[in-house]
Image (cartoon, coloured by chain):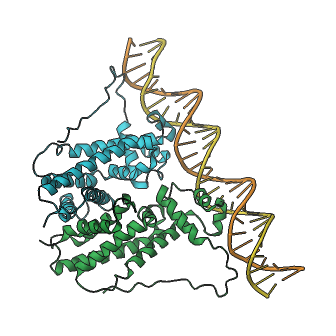
Chain colours: A cyan, B green, C yellow, D orange
DNA sequence: GTTTCCGCCAAACGCGCGTTTGGGTGAAAC
DNA sequence: GTTTCACCCAAACGCGCGTTTGGCGGAAAC
């Protein structure tokens, strides 16, 4: 039913001249951290550069502009999210069980990669429509996946048939993404217990009976 | 159990010199609209003034600065929210029923006053800690109200006893506030039906059995 | 040894922002 | 008629932003 996710990577250059520092991954991570802390508009390139120990102008050897940096942060966030859900993409079995597994994985991702989650949730607003489209469609296809599982769960008799699958999917995703607003890893609750609560409160309300 | 909410109003001036336009309510509403559309940092005072048909400098006859404008928007948002929940504050009966009523009222508020909701959710970040404190404590006391109701519902046997009341309250509020991200009033769904979904998905997962 | 070029610095640019100042207008108050 | 004052305009200020440009050092490539 679900197509296997294919990772497209750009082909590495034929002969790499040098094996320098290559701070590119560090740059994306630092940008994601700052975007999560202060928001996209609240973060200046000077902030990013300062945390990297260089000047803001130097960033332009890696990026073509601030919005370009955001795009790469979002792509990294999406890739990590896809990886977190990749193992579940091709499993079979009752829709309810798959839904539970996906909810748990989503909750775990939000908790462990909260830095990247924050950007993904806040960011569409700050990109021009054509640059945001790839993320909008990715989000939409994910929502449709959930929506289909809910409808199948209803057909299989495990979920309440009176709920609108689309609305239920939007509610569920909104709830899962809202976790990043208050979950602080390594606090009072373990991630395991948070996932239990997420399954109970996210799916429990959809169950039949 | 719950104290009656008291509305504190500043005493009106003894003798009002004039009955001019008094565009203050309009200013707060317009600012709330723009903050909801483009975010606080993405909205300039020129945007606000332009929609009001004046110049940005003229705004300083009403406000002392941009953050001051945000504070008044948040106060208005809080007041409207309190009013929406005031009727429910002193009712008695099983905790489960009160919880359902509050969830429905909260969902209705988010749907109908989405412009003010957006600022309240996004805004704490952009205020200095001392100016944000009044809203943080208001939010906290509201969360404690929900938390207490959940604990009482567990004691009365209507809600699952294995859930942490605090975590459940955070999940519930996160879910309710996430509605503003996708609910568009006067679309396919009626507000009534959205509230039904909110009750089902927000509380259903906490029920015993 | 010479060349190449990545990674970064240093300095400047234009722009829009929030904010301030001073003044003008017209209706209400007396 | 004079005064008062709420309301708004017009213009400027300093500042930090994103972005551009030119150049330097030093390791890798040949």
Q: Does B89 sit above or below residue B185?
A: below
Residue A53 visible in this rendered orientation of the protein: no
Left or right: residue A205 versus residue C26 is left
Left or right: residue B60 versus residue A10 is right
Residue B104 picture location, percent across and down: 31, 72
Q: Using the image as rendered, state which of residue B74 and residue B193 is in the foreground.
A: B193
Residue A176 visible in this rendered orientation of the protein: yes
Q: Residue at the spot x=27%, y=46% of the render?
A: A81
Residue D12 picture location, percent across and down: 73, 53
Residue A73 found in image quarter = top left
Residue D8 found in image quarter = bottom right
Q: Using the image as rendered, state which of residue B39 and residue A52 is in the foreground.
A: B39
Residue A166 picture location, percent across and down: 27, 55
Can you name the residue that lies furthest to the left here? A93
Q: Does A125 sit above or below residue A167?
A: above
The image quadrant where one finds the N terminus of chain B is: bottom left
Q: Does B56 sit above or below residue C4?
A: below
Q: How many marks do you count on the picture? A: 0
The image quadrant where one finds the C terminus of chain B is: bottom left
Q: Residue at the spot x=35%, y=44% of the render?
A: A135
Residue B46 picture location, percent across and down: 61, 56
Q: Does A55 sit above or below residue D26?
A: below
Left or right: residue A113 versus residue A63 is left
């Amino acid at each position: 039913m679900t197509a296997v996710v294919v990772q497209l990577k750009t082909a590495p250059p034929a002969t790499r001249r040098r094996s320098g520092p290559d701070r590119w991954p560090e740059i994306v991570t630092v940008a994601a951290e700052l975007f999560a802390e202060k928001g996209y508009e609240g973060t200046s390139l000077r902030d990013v550069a300062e945390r990297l120990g260089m000047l803001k102008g130097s960033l332009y050897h890696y990026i073509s502009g601030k919005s370009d940096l955001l795009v790469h942060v979002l792509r990294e966030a999406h890739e990590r999210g896809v990886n977190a859900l990749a193992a579940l993409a091709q499993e079979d079995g009752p829709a309810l069980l798959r839904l539970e597994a996906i909810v748990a994985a989503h909750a775990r991702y939000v908790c462990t990669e909260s830095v990247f989650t924050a950007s993904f949730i806040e960011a569409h607003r700050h990109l021009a429509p054509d640059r945001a489209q790839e993320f909008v469609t990715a989000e939409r296809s994910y929502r449709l996946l959930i929506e289909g599982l809910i409808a199948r769960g209803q057909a299989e008799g495990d979920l309440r048939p009176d709920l609108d699958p689309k609305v239920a999917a939007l509610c569920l995703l909104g709830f899962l993404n809202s976790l990043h607003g208050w979950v602080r890893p390594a606090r009072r609750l373990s991630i395991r217990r948070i996932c239990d609560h997420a399954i109970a409160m996210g799916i429990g309300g959809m169950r039949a009976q």
